[in-house]
Amino acid sequence: MSNLLEAHSVSKKFGDFTALNNASITVPKGSIFGLLGPNGAGKTTLIRIINQITMPDTGQVLLDGEPLATHHIKDIGYLPEERGLYKSMKVGEQALYLAQLKGLSKAEAKKRLKYWFDRLEIGDWWNKKIQELSKGMAQKIQFIVTVLHEPKLLIFDEPFSGFDPINANLIKDEILRLKDNGATVIFSTHRMESVEELCDHIALIHKSNKILDGRLDDIKQQYKTNTFEIAVKTNDKFLLEKELAQNFIVSPASFKTLGDVLKLNVKITDQQTPNNLLSYLTSKGEVSHFVELIPSANDIFIQAVKNN
Ligand SMILES: Nc1ncnc2c1ncn2[C@@H]1O[C@H](COP(=O)(O)OP(=O)(O)OP(=O)(O)O)[C@@H](O)[C@H]1O
């Protein structure tokens, strides 16, 4: 898979403050790439550099293998975190105006807007004033205007803030559909839980530095702790827990009992295999649950910060 975007060793200072320190990212074509990190980490700074709103002090950004140039602006659809619409304009009028700025003819813009307004169930709002819209409603308009001209690269900064869970899901599904139709997506968020179902690649930014990146599946494998959640039916739960602790590494805090079932998190050592644990458990009782614990993006982030 070739890369749509590459940022090489990008740094940016504001006065004495380093907002971004030598950060590199590679965004494969057709991927959804999550730029993750706490508030103030430097995500928006990197996104603004990609959008040519801010110039980097050092480093280079390539789009489709070429250095970024002004003509690339139409190849990128950008939904900024700070969102503003002209309050006194009507919704349809405003959307048409913004769509034409992206290079669409009026007729084409109208056709595409009608499609999207119906899709996001806001067809009735065409003649309403922007100031009558709630935050989430206005955000839907801005989402539409960002994707309308079908740019190669879509960049969404905190796209779900301001949406209720139902509309956040609606937007998630639309982002996945845009990817299926060939778009490449970068989105930035400090809410790790929103990445699990969406991103195939992630980069973690912490205090201006990129501290981790790669395919989410690969990273999850790397951060696995070989821990299994087990449930075993046994005559003596306390004896089994004690015996388990002699052979494996148990997490006492996870000890739970329900009738004659012992539930526990058990970690195997590097010398052991999951099968060693499973065979052992089967020899001791009836195993009703045996699942490897996969770290969440949040667990990975906490661990990566500790390792740095
Ligand atoms: N134009 C600027 N002038 C001075 N400092 C800035 C400027 N832009 C960003 N910064 C600082 O750089 C740091 C990184 O900001 P940035 O907006 O990139 O963070 P972020 O990761 O996007 O955070 P958030 O999730 O809160 O948007 C912050 O401490 C911010 O105050």
Image (tube, rainbow, N blue to C red):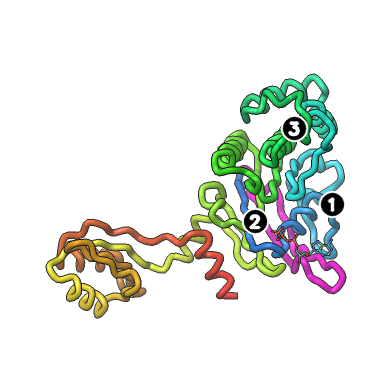
Give the residue type at disc 3: His
Horizontal arrangement in the rendering, residue 243 relative to residue 143 (left or right): left
Q: Residue at x 64, y 62 (%)?
A: 37
Q: CA distance from mark 3 to mark 1?
A: 20 Å
Residue sitting at the far left = 235
Magenta stretch bounds: 3-30
Circle 3 SS class: loop
Residue 283: image location, x then y, percent? 15, 66
Whether residue 202 appears in this view of the structure is: yes
Rendered position, 29 above or below 281: above
Where is residue 186? Give x, y as percent. 66, 49
* Mark sitting on residue 53: 1
Residues at marks 3 and 1 touching, judged by CB atoms closer than 8 Å: no
Q: Residue at x 70, y 46 (%)?
A: 155
Reading the image, the residue beneath label 3 is: 149
**Counting residues from the N terminus, which is met first, the one under dot 2 or under dot 3?**
2
List x then y, in percent, for residue 228.
33, 64
First along the sequence among labels 2 and 1 = 2
Q: Is residue 150 visible?
A: no
Does dot 1 land on a helix, a strand or a loop? Answer: loop
Q: Which mark is residue 35?
A: 2
Q: Quadrant of residue 171?
A: top right
Q: Which quadrant of the picture is home to ligand 1?
A: bottom right
* Amino acid at dot 1: Ile
Q: From the viewer's side, name the closer residue of 270 and 139.
A: 139
Going from N to C along the chain, the mark reached first, 3 or 1, is: 1
